Amino acid sequence: MTIAESYVEFATREARGVSPAYERLSLAVSRDDELLALLGALPRGKRQPNLLFGVVRLLGGPVDDPAAFRDFALANWPAIEAELRTRATQTNEPGRCAVLLPVLAALPQPLALLEVGASAGLCLYPDRYAYRYGDHALGAGEPVLGCAATGLAPPDRLPEVVWRAGLDLNPLRVTEPADVAWLDALIWPEHTHRRARLRAAAAVAASDPPLLVRGDLVDDLPALAARAPAGATLVVFHTSVLYQVPAPRRAAFADAVRGLPGHWISNESPDVLPHDALPEPPDEALYNVLALDGRPLAWTSPHGQAMTWFG
Ligand SMILES: C[S@@+](CC[C@H](N)C(=O)[O-])C[C@H]1O[C@@H](n2cnc3c(N)ncnc32)[C@H](O)[C@@H]1O
C-alpha cells in the first residue's frame, strides 16, 4: 500500500463517522505530493496518520482545517520530523477495560494482571473503574466506561486484583506531565469524552502507580510473570498491541504466553493472530477480536465502546 493509499484507508475505515477532522486531514494529506514526499523520507513505521496528527497536536498545530494544517506542517517540518522519529503511537485507552471485564470477572479470583504493551498501564485497573452496559451499572466513581454489549449477560461483579504489572518497550508515566500530554495528543480532536476519561483514569493510576517494566513482550515476559504472587490467577493480556509487532515475533509471543501458567486474554485486530473461522463482523467498521486462551469470543470496538459476543 502506498502512503497516499494508507491515508485514504485511515480516512475511510478509521476516521469516517468517528473524527470528521481527521477524515478531512487524512484525505488532504493523501493528495498532497509535498507532504507525501516528506513522509516518504521517514522509516516505514513513522508515517502513519495517527502519529503525524498526534505530533502536530502535541506541538500546538491546527488539525481542524487542512490548509492551516499543511502550512503548519511545512513550516515546522524539522520539529515534526524529530518527534515522529522518536515517538510511537501509544494511545492508552482505559475504555478497553469494558470489553475485558466480562472475561476477567469470570476467571478464578483473585487475579494477578500482567499487561504486555501497557503504555501507561491504564488498562491495569479494571477493578477500580465504573461501567455501564446499557442499563446495567457496575462499580462506582470515575471514569464510567460505557459499552454496548450484545449477546452476553454483562458481568455482575468486579474482579479482585492483587497484583498488576505492565511491560512496554517505552512505558509512559501517568505521574509525568509530558507523558500525559503525549497521551492527550493521541486522542482524536472531537473525542472530549475520551480526554475526560484519560484524566480520570490517570488520576486512579497515579494514586497507586502500577509496576511498569521497560522491555519486550517476548524476551522479557517470563521474568516479569515469575514475579506474580502465588495464590492468584495469572492473566497475561494485551489490547491493540500486536499490530505493532512483526509476524514472527507475534508467533513467538503466542508460544511464550502459552507456556505460562494461568490465562491469556487478547483483544487485537483479526489479522494479527491465527483464528479459525470467525463470524461476520457486525458491519464495515474496524473491530478487534477478544479471545481467551486463543479461543475467539467476541468482536469489540476499538475503544471498548461496544462488543458483540459470538453465538
Ligand atoms: C497502541 S498502544 C496500546 C496500549 C494499551 N494496550 C491500550 O490498549 O490502551 C501499543 C503499545 O504497545 C507497545 N509495544 C509495541 N511493541 C511492543 C513490544 N515488542 N514489547 C512491548 N511493548 C510493545 C507500544 O510501546 C505501545 O505502548
Image: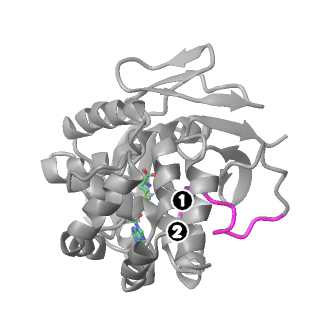
Q: Quadrant of residue 84?
A: bottom left
In the image, 219 versus 70, the foreground residue is 70
Task: Give the residue drawn at x 34%, y 62%.
Answer: 70
Label 1: few (<14), some or many (≥20) within 10 Å?
Answer: many
Task: Give the residue drawn at x 20%, y 56%.
Answer: 59
Identity, as a three-letter code, of the amino acid under mark 2: Arg
- Left or right of 273 on screen, residue 216: left
Identity, as a three-letter code, of the amino acid under mark 1: Leu
Label 2: few (<14), some or many (≥20) within 10 Å?
Answer: some
Is residue 272 positioned above or below 1 on the image? above
Residue 218 percent location from the top left of the image: 45, 76
Residue 196 percent location from the top left of the image: 33, 30
Is residue 99 positioned above or below 247 on the image? above
Main SS of residues in magenta: loop
Q: Which residue is mark 1?
A: 27
Highlighted magenta segment, given as a residue range: 261-276
Task: Give the residue drawn at x 29%, y 65%.
Answer: 73
Is the shortest distance between ligand 1 and the CB of mark 2 under 8 Å?
no
Q: Quadrant of the C terminus?
A: top right
Specify the quarter for ligand 1: bottom left
Residue 217 percent location from the top left of the image: 43, 71
Is residue 117 positioned above or below 23 on the image? below
In the image, 145 versus 236, the foreground residue is 145
Asked if disc 1 and disc 2 are in contact, CB closer than 8 Å, the reply is: yes
Q: Quadrant of residue 67?
A: bottom left
Is residue 171 positioned above or below 191 on the image? below
What is the secondary structure assignment of the residue under circle 2?
loop
What is the secondary structure assignment of the residue under circle 1?
helix
Q: Which residue is mark 2?
A: 31
- Left or right of 75 on screen, residue 277: right
